[in-house]
Image (spheres, helix red, strand yellow):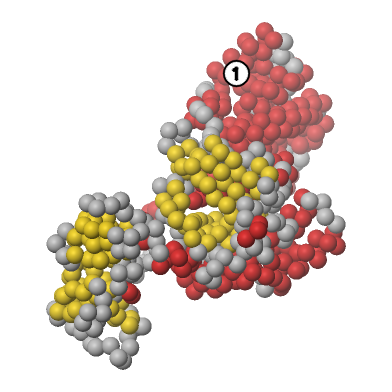
Amino acid sequence: MAVPSYAGPLERTWYYAFRVICGLIFFFLIAPILVIIPLSFNVQPYFTYTREMLTFDPAGYSLRWYEDFFSSRQWMMSIRNSVIIGILATLVATVLGTIAALGLSRKEMPFRGLIMGILISPMIVPLIISAAGMFFFYSSVGLASTFPGVILAHAALGIPFVIITVTATLVGFDHSLTRAAASLGADPTTTFRRVTFPLIMPGVISGALFAFITSFDEVVIVLFVAGVEQRTIPREMWSGIREQISPTILAVATILVMISIALLTTIELLRRRSERLRGIRPS
Amino acid sequence: MTNVSAAADDYGFVRFANVQKSYDGEILVVKDLNLDIAKGEFLTMLGPSGSGKTTCLMMLAGFESATYGEIRLKNERIDNVPPHKRGIGMVFQNYALFPHMTVAENLAFPLRVRKMGKAEIEDRVKRALEMVELPAMAGRMPAQLSGGQQQRVAVARALVFEPDLVLMDEPLGALDKNLREQMQYEIKHIHESLGVTVVYVTHDQSEALTMSNRIAVFNDGVIQQLAPPADLYERPDNAFVAAFIGENNKLKGKVEQMDGQSCTVRLEDGSSVVALPVNVGGKGEPTTLSLRPERVVVAPAEGSLPNAFEARVEELIYLGDHIRTRVSVCGTDEFIVKIPNAQSHARISRGEMVRIGWAMEDCRALDA
């Protein structure tokens, strides 16, 4: 968008100022993340840039923190825990969230607003309160310090994301398609499998990815509900900062950033695919 | 198309008996509907929005349940059969093509859920596409088709599994005027060549008149009149039908005198009109006279018509084949006369006084 030819001096100034402000906001958001990536290659056990690093001397860089990470049994176990808990919590959240969204999208469903509010509440209630509540509740039913406990707790956090993304997909969903399928002889199960699900799938997958990321970088609930056996990556990083102060966590952070970028790219590609399927031209 | 071409022996192929529908338990959207549809018939449910026509169609399709009464198809009750087991084809207003399937996959869908063989599915899909003249479009996605093409695919999909009954819910509403007229003829031809029974819902009267064997005019949850198109236009039973189908001049008055064949009606301005009693109570009762604009004769021969009045020309609108003329007569200035644009007709101009008249049979005395 170029400056229009009729713009006065004030508008011209604003045109450039606007771009500078946008750039600053962008920098503010992204700099803390970018700054850790080179640091994770630091040859010295410091959290600051060394002279060698600033002069781009190859001797200032190394992969030692990555080696440290991949050779540590404790880190590897936390990765395994994070992946297991993340995947299972995502599965539970996706199935329950999708079913809830389908039910809540029906006009005849009573108290839709209220039920929606309750299901979304884990997103709104401060995490520390949910975590404390879960701790006391899970302790009394024997779920504290167990994998099922952490998985259920993370599923509860993920469900709102799935409900929101699937509901958003269902807003544009043409309900005459399910009627058409029924008139053509398809029973409700076939209709769901062959018509409804393929069309809401992008919403289901983006909800699932959000649920996975939520579980993958969640630390508060893990601190309360998980035991030593269920330590996840964020939990390990938290104790890494408090107890060891080793740049290994910078390497971990870099890896997590890469995973997040990969997942978000997937979401975007899926969204475009679904728009193409629905006949919406990419703008 | 003036007569029902369907075989009369198969009346009751679809039967609504005392059907009522209420969404809230208080207001009846459909009031005591009784309707028999013959096999092979093209029946149109016509009416303004909220008249109950779409609700009737949805009850027949199984997407709404009747509050009271029964619906039969081929003499079997279907009110408790779920929609997917009724075997009724349906064309939706917005086409409802599956956007993630190609045209061929859309057409194959009803055949695949019926577990047909691959070769037979291919063959039937091909024939269905030829029927709607889109054989080259099999591999396209619905979004790549124009509105008219999508509508044809929707029609083909509703017919490909050879249902005995096809329902159409304002299928041409989203198309532009030319395409709509073309599609009306195509649907009509498909109906004639396949002999399938069609129940068609529309609010467009010209669509209903063009396509139907019979038309059921709905208003306020009740069928106002059920008749072939020509009867409906020329012999409306009540003031609603007269006003809803075609253009209509309305004159209000009271019945002054009545014998078997005709009645004399005193209008509000004091003039007296001889009319055909169709739907009037008796002497002293209020009535609405209905008169088609094209049945009004300009400058009739003296004494040739029982009704003749002096009218003042208020407005002339040139419409090519005819001139729509608004005149003041019998106490109304909304009286429309259609004057054919023929050489033999004398030119009239605004403000002139002309003599107009009409026959007793063309002026129908209906309910007030």
Is B54 in front, or is B172?
B54
Please, what secondary structure does the residue beneath circle 1 have?
helix
Residue at image coords 51%, 50%? B54
Q: Residue at x 50, y 27 (%)?
A: A111
* Relative side of A50 to B303, left or right: right
Label 1 crowd bin: few (<14), some (14–19), many (20+), radius 10 Å: some
Residue B282 image point, x, y percent: 28, 52
Q: Which residue is mark 1?
A: A131
Residue B86, visible in the rendered structure? yes
Q: Residue at x 56, y 27 (%)?
A: A119
Split into 4 quadrants, where in the image is the C terminus of chain A?
bottom right
Which of the pair B267/A166 is nearer the observer?
B267
Residue A271 placed where, x, y %? Answer: 62, 50
Query: Is residue B2 shown left or right of residue B85?
Result: left
Q: Amino acid at mark 1?
A: Ala
Direction front: furthest residue: B259
Closest to the observer, A118 or A267: A118
Host chain of mark 1: A
Quadrant in the picture for residue B270: bottom left
